[in-house]
Image: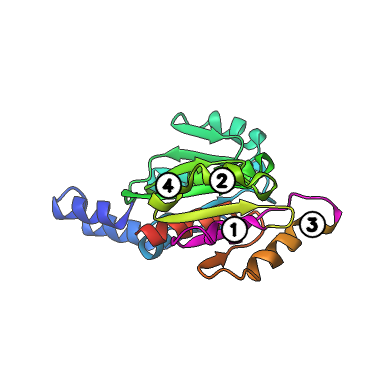
Amino acid sequence: MSIQTILKQFKKGLVSEKEILKVIKKIPFSDIEFAKVDHHRVLRRGIPEVIFCEGKTPEQVVRIAEDMYAHHGFVFATRAHKKIFTILQKKFTDICYNELGKVIIIGKNKHQTKKKKTVAIITAGTSDINIAEEAYMTTTTLGSTAIKIYDVGVAGIHRLFRFQDTIENANVLIVIAGMEGALPSVVSGITSKPIIAVPTSKGYGTALGGITALFAMLNSCSPGVTVVNIDNGFGAGYFAHMINN
């Protein structure tokens, strides 16, 4: 239960002072042994804490999700394999799963700030789509409008130019690429919009798991490009929505 909800109930006389103090005492965070679930994050950041599932056991993810859902009626989980979704599906009915992006949404984000401004999510190749889908799910769940422009990398750059009007009409661009990571610089050269570049871990040996793309993006000669970490579609989507906000 949120602070706003309990205060409204108190104002209406539906809960006592003793009951409200009991709830407020538990609101800052829940201590469930292996995790301290931060329930005040929504007040500071506008969205409840997000579960990063990678490295956690399914049992840990379930316990965190149950605690978050009890407080917010909403759970956002990233890097979630299908096994985790299958387990959570048995406990929650209002659940959806983006298998490509490995994102799980449970319930509804009551703190969603809807924005008509568009985020264009652009990938160099089909292999980058899983990161793009994480960015898409993040951006749209937070409340921004997003469009997808996939597989328009520099190996066939003529594909990109067909979407030049769409790109220019967007408010912010997320440009995702592996290999040598050249696409964000190219896109920046044809638009006035701010670009969030996302290097991916896709590529052969000297791609070095995304480090080559990361360095290329950090060294972009085109102004207006900022860079998030390798494969960080969530961070890119979150930041894009903040720009829209």
Compared to 125, does 21 lie above or below?
below
Tag 1 and tag 4, C-beta contact below 8 Å: no
Front in this rendered view, residue 63 or 178? 178
Q: Identify residue for label 3.
A: 207
Compared to 39, does 101 lie above or below?
above
Report the span colored magenta. Answer: 182-205
The residues bearing labels 2 and 3 have C-alpha atoms spaced at a distance of 23 Å
Q: Position of residue 128 (x, y in %)?
A: 65, 45
Q: In the image, what residue occupies the spot 44% across and 60% down?
A: 193
- Of labels 4 and 3, earlier in sequence is 4
Of discs 4 and 3, which sits in the foreground?
4
Q: Identify residue for label 2.
A: 160
Give, as a three-letter code, the residue at label 3: Ala
Tag 3 and tag 1, C-beta contact below 8 Å: no
Q: In the image, what residue occupies the spot 62% across and 68% down?
A: 220
Compared to 63, does 184 lie above or below?
below
Give, as a three-letter code, the residue at label 2: Leu
